[in-house]
Amino acid sequence: MAILALVGCASQPTEQQLPERDIDREPLVESIPDIRTSGADYLRLARNAENRAQTYQYLLRATDAFFDAADWQRGAAVLSQLEDIQLPTSLRADYAMQRARLLIHFEQWRSALTTLESIESTRDRQQRVELTQLYYQVYAGQNRHLSAARQLVELATYDPEQDYSDITWQHFAQVPAAYWRQAVRENNDVMRGWTTLFTRVTQALDMREPIAGSLELWLQQFPAHPATPRVERLLNDAPWISEQPRRIAVLLPLTGQFAQQGQAIRDGVLAALSNERNEDVIFIDTSLTDSEQALRRLHDENIEAVIGPLAREYVDRFARTLVNMDEPAPWVHLWLNRAPDDYPASLDNFFALDIDTEVESAVAYLSQLGHEQVLVFGTDTQRGRQLANQFESTWQRRHGPASARTGSYRSSNDMPDVVAQSLHVRDSAARIAQVEAAAGAISIESEPRSRQDVTAVYLLGDAAQARLLKPFIETNISPFASRMPVFASSAMHEAAGNRGRGDLDGITFSDAPWLLPEHPQADLLQRFSRLRPNLSPSSQRLVAMGYDAMELLPRISAMNWYPGYDHAGLTGQLQIFDNAVQRQLSWAMFESNTLRRQPNHVNTVDRNTL
């Protein structure tokens, strides 16, 4: 309603001003004819209405006509005239729906949903259709894909000639797979068809099986379902539905500058192959093979899937070689880096372990914990500023402007001043000095206090920097404030000697779940630790990357059209959006001489948000 009031204050044409009239106090509400005219014409009819009820109806029609014409300012101005009027019961639903339309236009999703939920059930068919359309817009705007799909299924019952199947499919495909892994029951036949489809596809992908059998069985059970044409197209046009890649090439630097990284990924690939896999895998050393030679060998070996390359320079060269090919490459491709510049990324898939992913994961995790104001500390370097800006912009998109601030330091000497200034302790000390100066000889007991709005700190640096920063953060927190939680990236966990150090106690950091306690495949990590006793956490993450790359290959094509599907990988909970593998990391806290894994809500499903 605040939006309506603000917009309603805008200048309005004279014709919108209603004259004072002696209109009946208790109007008879008779439906006015639907003449489908302009908003201005409806306003003229409102001025000459026979009674108050007709006036209100014409005003609502004028609002609807202005909104249809995208004239939101004039429509809001008309609607504002009805704001404080006790409308007849039969018109309240129309008013609420017009108000919801305006809120939806301004992307005020929660307020719009509250407005729609205030509408009592109506028997008018057209109103039910419009109400369903508005609910759909709200749920789609909130990315509540299951609820949005339900509204489309209902809309299809009102208008069977309209084909909603493609957009309905897109919404169902974005519902988290965790929902389909539960026992889902539906009474509606159409909804039962949709839920059965995605439940069976999810089960097949979880078992690393081709989904063709599941789709064919579904067609037999639901031959007349709206999704049937889409399923038939998948079976006819996508060979990966029934045949998974068997001949795989892995492009890695196995000698030279990046040999250690390439060999770690190779070890992960081999570990995945030990799980009763029957693929034929060849390794190509990119340090000894140029991109043209590698390309010829891929064709000569009849390769069906490619993993790699890894090194940035080789990635760029190999991408240029592929772009110059006369025909698209005939294999599924999972690059082990970010997409090269000016490369048609939609043709392939990209899997990278980088700090950018950790920043994105941190924003999601801290938001999930309920933090709204965050301080970020990082180095005053080009990379440090880039990461800080990324965190700030991502955080502020969720929580609004000024909800995140950055303190940058060039060296350890800058840290005390940066922390004190960021926590506003210097401002507090200045105010105390002013009071003491004004008081003269009067003794005043005081202590500078930190800002109260900040509820968490995120560190972009490594463990060495955290050891220096943490004491300054703790000593600058007001004694009247609760303990400030400190979060960080996997850089906190980089060296084995850091684990359990008292000076890192209380810091919660993100990392690949395989490197944290209580992981289901902890025995695999222990075996690698025995075989490679000098393997650093960085190399262990690369082993996990190679393992996950092999696990993704049988699923990767389906995951591109089914972005709601997630795979519990060693490097994180993995999904594919826009042809890029996205990782949801796990979290642990330094506590005395151990690491304590923190709750992770990735696999929980809140039905109120679906």
Image (cartoon, rainbow, N blue to C red):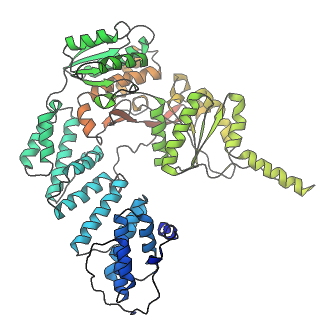
Which residue is at a point 57% across and 31% down the rendered structure image?
A: 384
Above or below residue 528? Residue 99 is below
Which residue is pictured at 89% across the width and 57% down the height?
439
Residue 561 horizontal/vertical position (percent): 25, 39
Q: Is residue 531 left or right of residue 271?
A: right
**Depth check: 30 or 185 in front?**
30
Residue 452 pos. (x, y %): 64, 52
* Residue 597 occupies quadrant: top left
* Residue at 51% over, 23% down: 496
Number of labels in the image equals 0
Does residue 261 show up? yes
Tell me if residue 43 comes above or below residue 317 in the rendering: below
Q: What residue occupies the far top of the structure in this picture? A: 288
Compare residues 510 and 326 and report the one nearer the observer. Answer: 326
170 sits to left or right of 15: left
Q: Is residue 267 visible?
A: no
Picture quadrant of residue 323: top left
Q: Nearer the viewer, residue 540 or 504?
A: 540
Instruction: Indicate whether 501 appears above or below 219.
Output: above
Give the side of residue 222 with respect to residue 131, left or right: left
x and y, in percent, of residue 487 in the image: 54, 39
Q: Position of residue 78 (x, y in %)?
A: 43, 74
Vertical placement of residue 410 versus 27, above or below: above
